[in-house]
């Protein structure tokens, strides 16, 4: 069992109330299983900060599919915040690492900017927890994600990071199964123009 899973389970076992969680998410397809799991313990609001996604049509499509999923599970009452977008500035920061392989330094920076922006907003708005859906994907580096989250929690205390690895313990397989049933749009590249190439 992944230690991130053990830490996640410890965290939810020790909850004494239903805290507010700001949850970074990048598409509908990744969210299916994690939202069903989290909504049992947290008051969840999704934060769609994804300046990495290129082009605009793809960003809009992923957002629409996320909204479609939220409407399917509307009985869960999960919120959605879409912050102002500045994709050119974000992608300029990744450009020097354009040739890096997926999963390397460029992705670390990409996770870091989006997780940090989520923490900044969570801090300003008084959320107790901040987390991200990204670890549900087998292509995302859970060590990077959890390291960045811990560092942000130290910087933006008292906001806590929700350590997780949603793909573990059958999470990825369950997410894929649920997705097939819902027929949500499944992107064929991660998001940035470098992954599209
Ligand atoms: S491949 Fe994905 S995670 Fe990596 S930099 Fe591009 S959009 Fe970000």
Image (cartoon, helix red, strand yellow):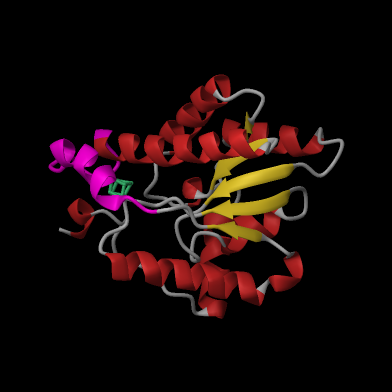
**Considering only vertical position in the picture, is 26 above or below 127?**
below
- Going by the picture, which residue comes out furthest to the right? 16
Question: Can I make out residue 29 in this image?
Answer: yes
Q: Residue at x 59, y 59 (%)?
A: 80
Q: Residue at x 54, y 25 (%)?
A: 150
Left or right of residue 159, residue 132 in this image: left
Q: Residue at x 61, y 69 (%)?
A: 70
**Residue 184, percent from left and from top:** 48, 75
Left or right of residue 20, residue 102 in this image: left
Inspect the magenta stretch and tell me whether residue 88 lies in it.
yes
Q: Give the tally of numbered discs.
A: 0
Q: For this rendering, which residue is in front, 149 or 81?
A: 81
Q: For this rendering, which residue is in front, 91 or 188?
A: 91
Choose top left, top right, bottom left or bottom right for residue 187: bottom left
- Going by the picture, which residue comes out furthest to the top? 154
Quarter of the picture holding the N terminus: top right
Inspect the magenta stretch and tell me whether residue 11 lies in it.
no
Choose top left, top right, bottom left or bottom right for residue 19: top right
**Considering only vertical position in the picture, is 71 above or below 33?**
below
**Residue 182, percent from left and from top:** 55, 78
**Residue 116, percent from left and from top:** 46, 34
Quarter of the picture holding the C terminus: bottom left
Q: Residue at x 61, y 48 (%)?
A: 169
Question: Can I make out residue 186 in this image?
Answer: no
Q: Which residues are magenta?
A: 85-105
**Residue 30, percent from left and from top:** 50, 59
């Amino acid at each position: 069992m992944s230690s991130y899973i053990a830490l996640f389970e410890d965290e939810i076992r020790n909850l004494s109330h239903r805290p507010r969680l700001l949850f970074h998410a990048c598409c509908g397809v990744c969210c299916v299983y994690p939202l069903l799991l989290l909504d049992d313990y947290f008051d969840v609001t999704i934060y769609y900060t994804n300046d990495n996604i290129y082009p605009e049509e793809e960003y809009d499509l992923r957002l629409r599919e996320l909204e479609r999923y939220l409407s399917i599970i509307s009985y869960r009452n999960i919120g959605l915040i879409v912050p102002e977008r500045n994709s050119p500035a974000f992608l300029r920061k990744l450009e020097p690492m354009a040739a890096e392989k997926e999963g390397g330094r460029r992705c670390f920076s990409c996770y870091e900017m989006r997780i940090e922006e989520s923490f900044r907003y969570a801090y300003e708005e008084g959320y107790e927890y901040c987390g991200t859906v990204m670890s549900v994907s087998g292509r995302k580096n859970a060590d990077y994600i959890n390291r960045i989250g811990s560092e942000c929690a130290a910087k933006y205390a008292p906001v806590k990071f929700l350590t997780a690895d949603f793909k573990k313990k059958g999470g990825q397989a369950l997410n894929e199964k649920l997705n097939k049933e819902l027929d949500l749009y499944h992107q064929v590249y991660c998001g940035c123009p470098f992954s599209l190439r």
